[in-house]
Amino acid sequence: PKTVDPKQIFKLMMGLVLSPEFIARERDWLRAMRDRVLPNLSVEGFVAQMAATMAHDATAELGRIEAPTLILKPAADQLIPPRASDELARLIPGAQLVTFDHGSHGFNVEQADKFNRAVLAGFSQHPPDD
């Protein structure tokens, strides 16, 4: 039987998570990440995680969320369709949706400054109760 090389999984996932421009520009960063991730990557664990993700559906529970909710939508996500963020915003009462144009699934890395500003702005709108 054929086996799956963890390097193949890493390469596939990075192609879905990061933009081609980021991959081309940040090869050293990607190599360092690969070197950190691969020793701990379990093909069986990865497959189990994907199966669990695909089977999980909490749609019916979303309307019960009462906490302030910030949804960050990367408009060019190749892993999770951006329409999923729209659906979350529609189903969670009072949710705030912020769209990142040209954002990949890994926009928190690729556009860290914009991501951090959006998260901090979301926190500032809802300070914790003392």
Image (tube, helix red, strand yellow):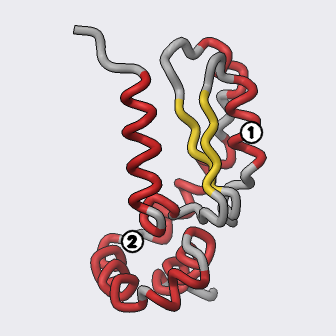
The residue under label 2 is 41
Going by the picture, which residue comes out furthest to the top?
Answer: 130
| Left or right of 77 on screen, residue 90 | right
Q: Which amino acid does label 2 sit on?
A: Leu
The residue under label 1 is 86
Q: Nearer the viewer, mark 2 or mark 1?
A: 1
Image location of residue 62, percent across then percent down:
65, 21
Q: Earlier in the sequence, mark 2 or mark 1?
A: 2
Secondary element under disc 2, as helix, strand or loop, is loop
| Left or right of 94 on screen, residue 111 | left
Query: Callout 2: few (<14), some (14-19), or many (20+) C-alpha neighbours within 10 Å?
Result: some
Residue shown at 72% from the left, 51% from the top: 82
Image location of residue 61, percent across then percent down:
65, 19
- Quadrant for the N terminus, please: bottom right
Q: Which amino acid does label 1 sit on?
A: Asp
Query: Callout 1: few (<14), some (14-19), or many (20+) C-alpha neighbours within 10 Å?
Result: some
Residue 37, above or below 20:
above
Residue 81, above or below 31:
above
Image location of residue 31, percent across then percent down:
36, 88
Q: Nearer the viewer, residue 84 or 75?
A: 75
